[in-house]
Every structure is written in structure tokens, then in C-alpha cells.
Image (cartoon, rainbow, N blue to C red):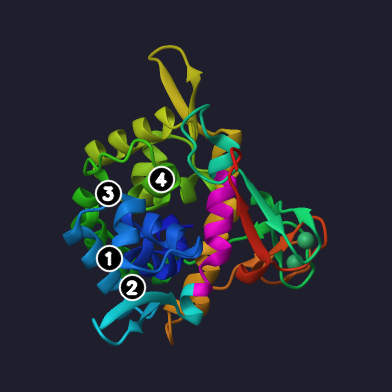
């Protein structure tokens, strides 16, 4: 089995081109919170004009936001979500939930509570199989053996990863902004690849290197980053010479539904006619299609039915 092929099938790679950097996720977060106008977005996100302009242009080009005239006198525009953009709501909600679950005390500026007005309950979200409605768990997904057709996909992803490396590790000065966390993990292709390899059971340095064909300095850097972020932990398996393997922590395991939901978005909205490898949901033996569900009423939460409540509100 070759992990590169499972890269979530370039679906994730394509999605990440659009939304996979910190600023993009921050801008989207605020758009979902109802912020529509350039100046407001700038204040909320703390992005520079140039950065915000680039991200908004990219969102418009990629059909995630559209511009809408709100004042004819000054020709002023605001930004609204397209259907495709609204499709990102599930991934946003799960990112939120993940952030709230794992935030260090004091570093969470996200609304801590989400409220589902359809059922009048606080919203807790689960990623579920669209067929059998079972929650999506790491061990329940069957990955195909695709080693034969991976080389081209792999090269494509590697090339993109190289282009994007700088961006993902650039200092952003965003310490107080909480999506930084999740976006710096899954918004970086190499980190994402390593996390996906971990989902598949890869745990040793040599195996990561072989499966991902990744330069050792990049691999070492990303593994350190993931250990620091408490997504992976080092566990010694040999004393002489000392050797450790990298295992997913509980925090790392909880990234799985989020990664699967992002993959689903990429398949539904970003891939157009490209071929996607089919994963199978072991519970129902159906091709895996992922959705989200309110854990209370078991319905899919739509953006219009979800309210965000800050804890000090
Ligand atoms: Zn199922
Ligand atoms: Zn509900």
C-alpha cells in the first residue's frame, strides 16, 4: 500500500489550495459568523489589506464567496457565501469543535458554545456515514490498495507541497486566533500527509519516509511539530540504539472526522470530474460518504440554524 495514493486522492490537496492556509480559514470563520464587509473582516481577522484582498479574490475565483453590491452610491460590495462556500460549513463546525475541545486554557477566542435552533439544544456535532449514520471512526474505513497508480498523483502533490511550504510555516503573528491551531496542522500538506499516514497505521520514521517519499529534514521538522502540538507522541520501541515510533494521541485521533469531512467537501465541490478513489465504510460496506449530524436531534445542522454563543455573552 502506498500512502501517497491515499492522499486523500488529491481531493484534499485541491481543497487545501483554496482553503488550506491560516488566513483563509480565519476569513471563512468570520464569514460564517456573519461578517460580510472588507473593513469588518480586516478588523476581525487582523489580516493586512493585501493579505485579505488576496484571500477574498481567491475565494471569489474559486466560487466560495461572491461579491454583492450593498451600496450603489459608493459602489460598495460585500462578500457572501456561495453554495460551494456553504458546503464548507460542516468542516468549519468540526474545526470549531476540535479547537474548543483541545484549546489550552485562555487561548480560545472561538465561541465556546454552538446552539442548534432546530432542536433547541446546544450543538455537538458528529461526522457520520451518510448511509448507515454511524459515527466515522479511524478503524472503520477501508483504504484501497492503490500502489499501481500513484506515482503521478504523488509527484503532483509533492510539487504543490514544495511550493506551499513557506506559506504554511510563515510567522503570522496570530497567536490569539484559535483556528491557527487546526489550520497549521491540516493546512500544511506534509503535516496532513503524515497525519493521514498515521491514520493508516504508519508509526516509524523509516516507514513515513518510505511511504511519503519525504526529505528527512522535512519529515523531522513536521514530526517535531506534530509532537509539540500533541497530535503525535513518541513511544520508545527499542533501547539500544534508542528508537521511537510516533503514535496518534487522543487529540490526533479526533482529527480524523475533520479530515474526512474536508475530503468529502473536496469531492463534492472541488474536484469536478476528476477520479476519486473510493473508500469503503466497513460498518455498512457502502462507499464512504461523510456528513455531519447534531448529536441530539440527529439532523444535519445548516448554517441558518446554528447560533454561536461566546461564553462571556
Ligand atoms: Zn456506513
Ligand atoms: Zn439538533
Task: Note whether ligand 1 is within 8 Å of mark 4.
Answer: no
Task: Note whether ligand 2 is within 8 Å of mark 2.
Answer: no
In the rendered image, residue 88, in percent from the top left (x then y), is placed at 51, 68
Q: CA distance from mark 2 to mark 3?
A: 18 Å
Element assignment for label 2: helix
Which residue was labeled with disc 2?
59
In the rendered image, residue 37, in percent from the top left (x then y), is placed at 35, 68
**Marked residue nearer the N-terminal end (1 or 4):** 1
Which residue was labeled with disc 3?
168
**Marked residue nearer the N-terminal end (2 or 3):** 2
Please give the range of residues in magenta.
Answer: 86-98
Say above or below: 297 vs 216.
below
Element assignment for label 1: helix
The quarter of the rendered structure image containing the C terminus is: top right
Magenta region, main secondary structure: helix
In the rendered image, residue 294, in percent from the top left (x then y), is placed at 74, 59
Residue at (22% x, 51% y) in the render: 167
Which residue is the extreme one toward the top? 240
Label 1–label 2 contact, CB within 8 A: yes
Residue 140 in magenta stretch: no
Q: CA distance from mark 3 to mark 1?
A: 14 Å
Which residue was labeled with disc 4?
185
Choose between 29 and 225: the one closer to the eye: 29
Element assignment for label 3: helix
Which residue was labeled with disc 1?
55
Q: CA distance from mark 1 to mark 4?
A: 19 Å
Say above or below: 262 vs 114.
below
Say above or below: 275 vs 98.
below
Among the 4 quarters of the image, the one containing residue 147: bottom left
Name the front one of labels 1 and 4.
Answer: 1
Q: Quadrant of ligand 1?
A: bottom right
Amino acid at each position: 500500500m502506498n500512502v501517497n495514493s491515499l492522499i486523500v486522492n488529491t481531493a484534499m490537496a485541491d481543497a487545501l489550495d483554496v482553503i488550506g492556509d491560516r488566513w483563509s480559514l480565519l476569513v471563512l470563520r468570520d464569514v460564517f459568523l456573519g461578517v460580510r464587509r472588507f473593513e469588518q473582516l480586516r478588523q476581525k481577522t487582523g489580516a493586512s489589506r493585501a493579505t485579505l484582498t488576496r484571500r477574498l479574490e481567491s475565494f471569489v475565483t474559486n466560487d466560495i464567496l461572491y461579491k454583492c453590491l450593498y451600496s450603489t452610491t459608493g459602489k460598495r460590495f460585500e462578500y457572501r457565501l456561495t453554495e460551494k462556500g456553504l458546503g464548507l460549513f460542516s468542516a468549519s463546525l468540526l474545526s470549531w469543535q476540535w479547537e474548543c475541545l483541545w484549546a489550552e486554557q485562555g487561548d480560545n477566542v472561538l465561541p465556546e458554545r454552538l446552539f442548534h435552533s432546530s432542536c433547541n439544544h446546544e450543538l455537538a456535532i458528529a461526522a457520520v456515514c451518510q448511509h448507515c449514520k454511524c459515527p466515522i471512526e479511524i478503524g472503520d474505513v477501508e483504504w484501497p490498495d492503490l500502489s499501481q497508480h500513484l506515482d503521478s498523483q504523488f509527484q503532483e502533490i509533492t510539487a504543490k507541497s514544495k511550493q506551499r511550504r513557506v506559506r504554511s510555516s510563515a510567522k503570522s503573528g496570530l497567536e490569539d486566533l484559535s483556528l491557527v491551531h487546526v489550520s497549521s496542522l491540516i493546512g500544511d500538506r506534509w503535516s496532513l500527509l503524515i497525519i493521514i499516514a498515521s491514520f493508516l497505521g504508519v508509526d516509524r520514521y523509516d516507514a513515513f519516509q518510505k511511504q511519503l517519499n519525504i526529505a528527512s529534514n522535512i519529515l523531522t521538522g513536521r514530526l517535531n511539530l506534530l509532537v509539540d502540538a500533541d497530535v503525535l507522541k513518541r513511544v520508545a520501541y527499542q533501547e539500544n540504539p534508542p528508537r521511537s515510533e510516533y503514535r496518534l494521541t487522543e487529540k490526533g485521533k479526533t482529527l480524523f472526522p475533520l479530515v474526512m469531512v474536508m475530503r468529502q467537501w473536496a469531492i463534492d465541490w472541488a474536484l469536478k470530474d476528476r477520479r476519486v478513489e473510493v473508500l469503503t465504510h466497513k460498518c455498512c460496506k457502502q462507499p464512504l460518504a461523510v456528513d455531519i449530524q447534531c448529536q441530539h436531534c440527529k439532523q444535519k445542522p445548516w448554517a441558518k440554524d446554528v447560533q454561536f454563543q461566546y461564553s462571556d455573552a
